[in-house]
Structures are given as structure tokens and as C-alpha cells.
Amino acid sequence: MQVVWDSMQTSLQASIRTSIDSVTIVANKFPKITKLYTIKDFGGWDAAQKKFFADGAIFDQIQTGRR
């Protein structure tokens, strides 16, 4: 039983280490976050919906490669 447990533990430790390394690599590719935004910064939900998510708005433009 100890051999099975040791094998499982080693496998789990390896997967956790890989995940941590992956997060570190990805995190180093982007600038540090200096400000957190709220919906108020975008004019409220109604304004954000119209600007970003209405038909033909920014989200659609990004999806179709027009932006």
C-alpha cells in the first residue's frame, strides 16, 4: 500500500509543480495590473452593453477580425 501511496503522491506533486510553473511563465508575459476596474468605469451596465456587446459592437468586431 505504501508503494501505491508514494506513487500517487509523486504524481500529484509533479502535476502541481507543472501548474505553478505554467502560471509563472504566463504571468511573466503580461504587465502587472495596476488598477482594477468596475462597471462604473465603463458608464454602468447599460452603456457597457451598448458599447461592447450590442450587435456590431466591439465584441462582434473582434470576433470577425474587423478591429
Image: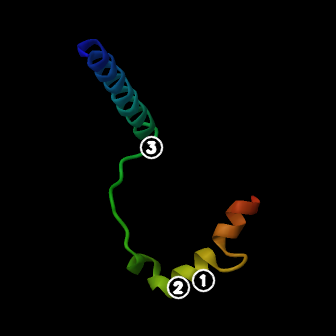
Mark before the other along the chain sequence, 1 or 3? 3
**Within 10 angstroms of label 3, few (less than 14), some, or many (20 or more) residues?**
few
Q: Residue furthest top?
A: 3
Q: Nearer the viewer, residue 17 or 43?
A: 17
Task: Please tell me how crowded label 1 is: few (under 14), some (14-19), or many (20+) other residues with Cα within 10 Å.
Answer: few
Q: Position of residue 19 (x, y in %)?
A: 39, 33
Indicate the amino acid at tag 1: Lys
| Quadrant of the image occupied by residue 12 | top left
Rendered view: 44 above or below 60: below
- The correct choice, above or below, for 48 with respect to 59 in the image is below
Residue 47's disc is 2
Element marked by disc 1: helix
Query: Residue 64, how many percent across, how many down?
Result: 76, 61
Q: Which residue is mark 1?
A: 50
Residue type, numbered disc 3:
Phe
Spatial distance from mark 1 to mark 3, Cα to Cα? 28 Å
- Considering only order in the chain, which callout, 2 or 3, is on the residue closer to the N terminus? 3
Instruction: Say which residue appears at 67% left-offset and 75% top-offset.
Output: 57
Residue matched to label 3: 30
Assess whether mark 2 and mark 1 are in contact (beta carbons under 8 angstroms).
yes
Task: Tell me the element at label 2.
Answer: helix
